[in-house]
Amino acid sequence: MDLTVRIGNLHLKNPVMTASGTFGYGEEYAEFIDLSMLGAVVVKGLSLLPKEGNPPPRIVETASGMLNAIGLQNIGIERFIREKVPFLRTYDTNVIVNFFGDSVDEYVAAAERLSSVDGIHGLEMNISCPNKQAGWCIFGTDPRVTSEVVGAVRKATKLPLIVKLSPNVTDISLMAKVAADAGADALSVINTLTGMVIDIRTRRPKLANRTGGLSGPAIRPVAVRMVYEVYKAVKVPIIGMGGIMHAEDALEFILAGASAVAVGTANFINPTATTDILEGIEAYMSEEKIGMVSTLTGAAHAA
């Protein structure tokens, strides 16, 4: 069986990746799985300088999912390069760095710095975090601003550039076209949905940030639908994500149009979720006598 897929110029040995923010910097899960088995490791979002994130409480469980308002807490790019990249270089997998900025200039500076580091194979632009401060979401919800920031980063790096799209828009197909036209090599679909949980005793939101990003199985049907729509709108590869817990979930995304999938919230429940899903995809291909996983991408559109 041929499990290889291409995401821009990236050659993945298989379509299973990790979702940023749920897998730390890779080493946190290395005692549970062999990172070399994965198509790619996507690390926690990084900024030029370290960030503390939002005040607690920052996580609350919901029906079939969870809300998080971490606020992109991270150790900063320089410390990541110094302390985490040497470890990641010891594994035979693609390392994709999720990054963000509070301005176009910060996005560009972050992309330039990361592009100079041996051992980083691709960049994922986060323009869609739902629990940052007011005004930040404009990067992923205003087509003009999206075009500007993606275009600026495209000029700043030769690495494969993946843009992570927000589901909190009226028309995700439009945002996908804008990002692709501005230079994205691939699109991550989708980030979390904005949500809220209220404590009926205190009559206050359970998250200190009030709102947070909803992830987990609860959002999967929405995410699959958005991948399906984006596949019809653009020619660039799609990385599908949103509530993938089992191989069957991953295959749904692939059939809807994803070339690869990213496993997120499932990692918190089952630290071997990524490799379990990979084994499940292999079993499905064997049962269905499918020689190349890439032939499944978008197959639901021909049904």
Image (spheres, rainbow, N blue to C red):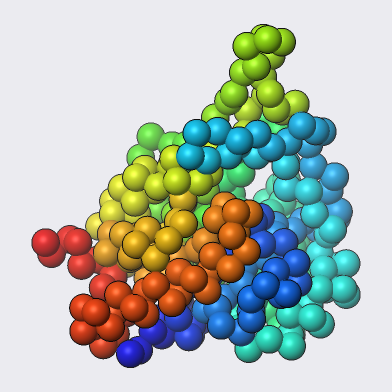
- Residue situated furthest left in the rendering: 303
Quick check: 293 left or right of 25? left
**In the image, residue 174 above or below residue 123:** above
Please indicate, yes or no, whether residue 22 appears anywhere in the rendered image.
yes
Could you tell me which residue is drawn at 20 percent across and 67 percent down?
299
Q: Measured from the top left, where is residue 57 in percent x and y? A: 77, 32
Q: Nearer the viewer, residue 107 or 17?
A: 17
State the quadrant of the N terminus.
bottom left
Q: Nearer the viewer, residue 222 or 99?
A: 222
Could you tell me which residue is drawn at 29 percent across and 79 percent down?
285
Q: Measured from the top left, where is residue 284 in percent x and y? A: 30, 75
Quick check: 108 left or right of 38? right
Could you tell me which residue is drawn at 79 percent across and 42 percent down?
53
Q: Nearer the viewer, residue 111 or 70?
A: 70
Residue 5: quadrant of the picture? bottom left
Please indicate, yes or no, whether residue 152 appears anywhere in the rendered image.
no
Residue 116: quadrant of the picture? bottom right
Quick check: 214 left or right of 206? left
Could you tell me which residue is drawn at 82 percent across and 68 percent down?
80
Q: Measured from the top left, where is residue 189 in percent x and y? A: 44, 54
Residue 199: quadrant of the picture? top right
**In the image, residue 27 above or below residue 170:** below
State the quadrant of the C terminus.
bottom left
Q: Measured from the top left, where is residue 137 in percent x and y? A: 59, 38
How many numbered marks, from 0 up? Answer: 0
